[in-house]
Amino acid sequence: MKIGILTFHFGNNYGAVLQCYALLTVLKQLGYDPEIINYVYRFLPDNRVRRIKEKIKFQIQNGRIFSHFRKRFLTPISFAIKSDKDWSMIGIKYDVVIVGSDQVWRYKYTDYKIKHYFFDFVPDGIKKMSYAASFGVGEFEGNQTVIEKIKPLLARFNAISVREKSGVEICRSVFGFDAVHVLDPTMLLQPEQYELISGEKTGKLKPPYIAYYFLDDHEDKMKIIKEYSSKTGIKKFISLLPKKKDFSYFMPPLLSFSDYTYPSVPEWLYRISNAEFVITDSFHGTVFSILFNKQFLCIGNEIRGLSRMNDLLTLFGLKNRLITETNFVFPESRIDYSPVNQILAQEREMSVKFLLKAINL
């Protein structure tokens, strides 16, 4: 059975590429023939200066890092979709199409292109479903006009699943459809399966160390790391991003390119899996902390979407690991991963059953 996956595979972001890898891998393990639908929407204004800036940033920071991972692990992939004709051709190519995971249904990110992520280009005879699609935040960001355009598209879906409990409520109250809550694809794989990727890391970091992964830098977050370091006596902390994420586009660095180079995906996984403790403000940073059974703290970020963190941590009974930059208390007890892993195993089984049932409806 040929399955097309529409997701954010193109993002130069660890969570984006790993969730795509995970869903692709699971579908292959289940005996299907999946392929990534190669649609790249950059969410950028048609502005020449902005494109030049992004190109510089792309080349210096992380372009080759993520491109290498995509070429090796995110295969097969369809031809690039660049026109309405391409959409019409891709729409009849598969037996089943799946949208998700990641924030594919967040209007802030997809804007007027959101209709593609509800399969406006796919004919009625082809099965349509979502797997762990996310609205990103606790409410739908589009207006009533957008909602009315999406409703008839969503009505054509054979099965709907979302990544957050809040997404279940959005589907029900905003669009009038029932949805199933499932795990992020990355949690469908066993930790050992990621060793096939992280095992490529040849260097070694000497533990113990605190690994931190911040999508948004802030002085208060570094204070949290230093305070925890003082509390535990762990003096070494390792960043999972470059030393300097930002620079002047008008005066790009000439010699210190290493400061702007992202760790490879294997390196990123390796640094989390071997850390004594992880501090992060990232959804997938939190996901992999749980998968690798790490002691961790998650710093909530309301702008990026706090409901994602709330739902994830509540599911596993880890709500006390969620703090904010200005109001935090370090949990006194360590995480007991026995009940967490039991919940994970149960949720993994239910999520895979949803996939199988939805594909074979």
Image (cartoon, rainbow, N blue to C red):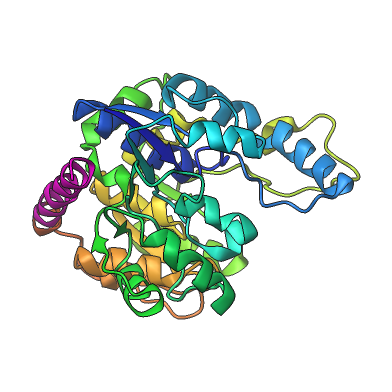
User: Residue, x 82% and y 48% (percent of image)?
Assistant: 50
Q: Nearer the viewer, residue 170 or 205?
A: 170
Image x and y of residue 209, in percent: 39, 45
User: For this view, does 357 lie left or right of residue 250?
Assistant: left
> Over which residues does the magenta segment extend?
342-361
Image quadrant assignment for residue 166: bottom left
Quarter assignment of residue 194: top left
Vertical order, 311 against 85 (above or below): below
Question: Which quadrant is home to the N terminus?
Answer: top left
Percent position of residue 29, x then y? 21, 27
Please give the name of the residue rendered at 45% of the width and 74% of the height, measured from the top-left corner.
324
- Type of secondary structure dominating the magenta stretch: helix
Pick whichever, 57 or 252, lies toward us.
57
Q: In this view, does 25 lie to the left or right of 305?
A: left
Q: Is residue 16 above or below residue 346?
A: above
Quadrant for the C terminus, please. Answer: top left
Q: Is residue 359 magenta?
A: yes
Q: Is residue 35 above or below residue 136?
A: above
- At a point 41% along the width and 51% down the height, the residue shown is 285
In terms of depth relative to the viewer, which is nearer, 81 or 246? 81
Q: Is residue 183 above or below residue 58?
A: below
Query: Is any part of residue 143 visible from this angle?
Result: no
In the rendered image, residue 63, in percent from the top left (x then y), is placed at: 64, 31
Residue 272 percent coordinates (x, y) = 37, 42
Q: Can residue 40 be seen in this view?
A: yes
Q: Is residue 132 magenta?
A: no
